[in-house]
Amino acid sequence: MVAALVSLRWRIVIHQFRRDWWRMLFVVAGAIWAALLIPGVLVGSARLSTESTAVKAEVLIAVGALIGAAWIVVPLLATGVDDSLDPTRFAAWGVSARRLMPGLAVAAFTTVPAAFFVLVAVVMGSSWRGDGGVGPVAVGTVGAVLTAVSWVFSSRLAALWGARILASTLGRWLVALAVAGLIGVIAAGVVVVRADGLESAFDYEISTFLNALGSTPVGAGFAAARDVGFQGGWSPWWRLAMMVAWVWVLFEAWRSAVDHALVNPLSRGGGTRKRGDAIAAAVGGRDVRGHAFTASQRIVAAVRRRTLRSWRADPRYVAQLVGALVMPLLFGGLAVVAAGGTGVWITALPIALALAVGWGRHNDLAYDSSGLWLDIVSAVSGRQIARGRLEATSRWAVPSVIGASVVAVAIAKRWDVLIPVTVTAVAVLYAALGVAAVTSVLLPYRVPAPGESPFGADAGSVGASLVGQIVSSVGTGVVVPLVAGPLVAAFVWGGAWWFASVVISATVGAGAAVGGVVAAGRVYEARSGKLISAVT
């Protein structure tokens, strides 16, 4: 079975290369990138081998923890994880998970990232060669290999569990609570570091935290060699035993997830309770002046409510929402820690958040492929569709950007710039959404269908996704400086620029949003028939 699955994987990959030559470019680029990094990894290992035992252990544990986190987070937030041996593909063949697992496990290590990071782990483990003979190197290498295996297994397990969790309403609430908890931890860490100073944090809090990680499966593999010849006794061996047990637990959990996937395909529904039809209710609503909706407003309201429901219930949308909010906030928190939280530069974080949310919608229409059929046969105006989808996204994005602006201004202790920063951030959001509205109908590409894993991607969409992302990045890069430039000028020259930044940013942002909706509507109506084949 192992040979059959590995051979099957390579046959699938070769077929994908023949069908989509862009995929080969990505693999070659990844291999070249890995090869270029190997000398740097070797030099870093040689330099680390000359450091003290304590420093060496802390560095290895920290690097190992970051790589392990990346192996879990990146496949979840960046769609396109390799799905050539997706367990659901074997559901119709009646093969048990226990028979599949050895082949799936071996095949998981035949990818470029897996092979590269196993090599990185081995090189990291060999950094103990300056600590008393063969013993530390042997223990360090064994621990590093076990840690690398845990990275790959945890990545596969996270992808399967992530799809199951996001498929249920309770799971989405748990994800929201986890995101809130992560933001709280980041905020608490920022407060502690700012209070004690960065140097003190590295000497005490971070050092204590890394030593604690060395007693967990996250860092025990890299910490085991530290104890050889120093603490003696069973210390190195129980850490290695812990890693063996952890790899086995991950393997069994992965097997259980595969077993579940083989007999429980994801539901294509939203998983919500039966309730009143919010979309139909929105059609009969009234505007802010109390007047009944016009025919155009009813269509926009229906599209808006439909999209809002997707943002709450569709696992694919939820995964996008989590990624759009978590990544800027996470890197923002790390930036605050690194810079000590001082300076007005922190006010750029809400603008970065707005940019990430807006740019991330560059393929927004593809996720509503089922609604696209309905809109086309119903002869809905493209402008109404673009406006409804933009308004739905802004319902959760605008409060998020405003909240980030308030927090950033509070950290910088510059309440006098709250209004200019907030207006600019919101204007950047609308400008980016305007560009995304155009690219989503101009260069759409296929995404996971409703009910499929939100962390997968169609094999033939690699080239189209690259072109779409490049065009969206160029368009956003042209518009956003026009919105954010006046705020930069205000920080540099002050005076009347503060008022001008509010007026110019709001005007350009609104104009870009309106222009994007109008242009998207025209493109949609010109090529609505081609959109179906592009996204399905």
Image: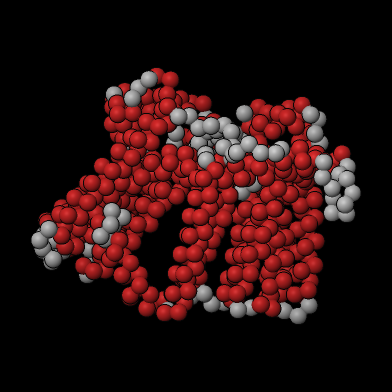
Total number of numbered discs in the rendering: 0
Q: Is residue 181 visible?
A: yes
Q: Residue at x 71, y 28 (%)?
A: 373
Q: Nearer the viewer, residue 165 or 55?
A: 165
- In this view, 286 is above or below 372: below
Task: Tell me if 141 is positioned left or right of 118 in this view.
Answer: left
Q: Position of residue 286 (x, y in %)?
A: 84, 48
Query: Is 401 left, or right, of 33 in this rendering?
Result: right
Where does the image place residue 422, in percent across and percent down from the top left? 69, 67
Instruction: State the residue at coordinates (75%, 64%).
Output: 505
Tell me which colouring the rendered structure shows: secondary structure
User: In which quadrant will I find the C terminus?
Assistant: top right
Residue 250: x %, y % from top left? 31, 43
The quarter of the displayed image where residue 158 is located? top left
In what quadrant of the picture does the N terminus appear?
top left
Asked if residue 525 lies left or right of residue 476, the reply is right
In the depicted view, which residue is nearer to us: 268 or 241?
Answer: 268
Residue plotted at (36% across, 52% down):
68
- Residue at the image position 62 percent from the left and 53 percent from the top: 357
Residue 75 occupies quadrant: top left
Whether residue 123 is visible here, answered yes or no, is: no
Residue furthest out toward the top: 93
